[in-house]
Amino acid sequence: VVVDRPGSVQTEIAVGRPGPDRSTPDGWAPYSVLPFVLGGSPSARIDAVLREEKGYTYGIRSSFRPRVAGGSFVTSGSVRSEVTGEAVEILLGLLDAARDGFTDAELRSGVDYVGKTAPGRYATADAVADETAALALERLPLDFTTRNLRAVAGLGRDDLDEAYRRVATGEWSVVLVGDAASVVPALEGRVGGPVSTVAL
C-alpha cells in the first residue's frame, strides 16, 4: 500500500508480519536477539547494505512488538524517494534470505548486545516501572525478564533460525508513505502482489 504524500523527498517504509507475544511457548529469548542481528546496528544485515553500502538511509530498524495476545514483527525506516523501488526490493530480499539462517558471529553479537546492555536498560525507576506494568498487562511473572536474559545467554544458532522461520513466511505487508507518482512506477517488477494507493 502506498500512502500518497505528493512532493515528498523521502519514503517511509514499513514491512510487517504478525508476530508472537512474550508468552509464546517457544520462548521469547530469540525474539530479543533477532532485531539486533537484522536491523539493530550499523553492522546488522539490513543497515550493512542499505546504509553502509548503498547510502540510501540513515537507518532501518527491525523490532518484535508483543501485545497481550500476539504481536507484530516490523522493519521500518526512511529512504530517499528516488531509490524507493530498489530499497524495497533489497529489503524484502534481505528479510527473505534470513530464512536461510544466521551465522555464529551474528548470534554471538546479538546475545552479547542484549545481555550486556540490560543493566543500562533497567537502570532507572521509570524503566523498572514500565517493565513491571508491561509484565502485569501481559500476565507474565515478575521474574520473566531475569529468566529471559538467562535464556538469551543460552541461545544456539538453531534457536535463532527456527524462531525467525516461524514468523518470516515470505508473505509481507508493505506500507510506503511517499510521493505516489514516483514511488508506484518504481515498484513495478520489484514487489510481489498488488499495489494500491491511498490518499492522506
Image (cartoon, rainbow, N blue to C red):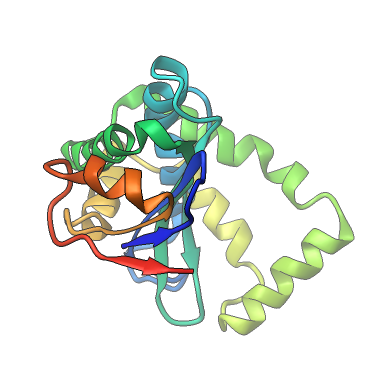
Residue at 62 percent of width and 57 percent of height:
146
Relative vertical location of residue 71 with respect to residue 169 in this rendering, above or below: below
| Front position in the image: 11 or 144 | 11
Residue at 57 percent of width and 34 percent of height:
113
Q: Position of residue 176 (x, y in %)?
A: 39, 54
Relative vertical location of residue 21 with respect to residue 55 in this rendering, above or below: below
Residue at 36 percent of width and 53 percent of height:
180
Q: Position of residue 52 (x, y in %)?
A: 46, 18
Q: Is residue 159 visible?
A: yes
Quarter residue 25 falls in? bottom left
Q: Is residue 61 visible?
A: no
Quadrant in the picture for the N terminus: bottom left
The number of discs equals 0
Q: Position of residue 138 (x, y in %)?
A: 56, 80
Relative vertical location of residue 3 with respect to residue 109 in this rendering, above or below: below
| Front position in the image: 167 or 84 | 84
Quarter residue 53 falls in? top left
| Front position in the image: 128 or 42 | 42
Q: Position of residue 60 (x, y in %)?
A: 48, 39
Q: Residue furthest top?
A: 53
- Would residue 103 be found to the left or right of residue 64 on screen? left
Residue at 53 percent of width and 34 percent of height:
59
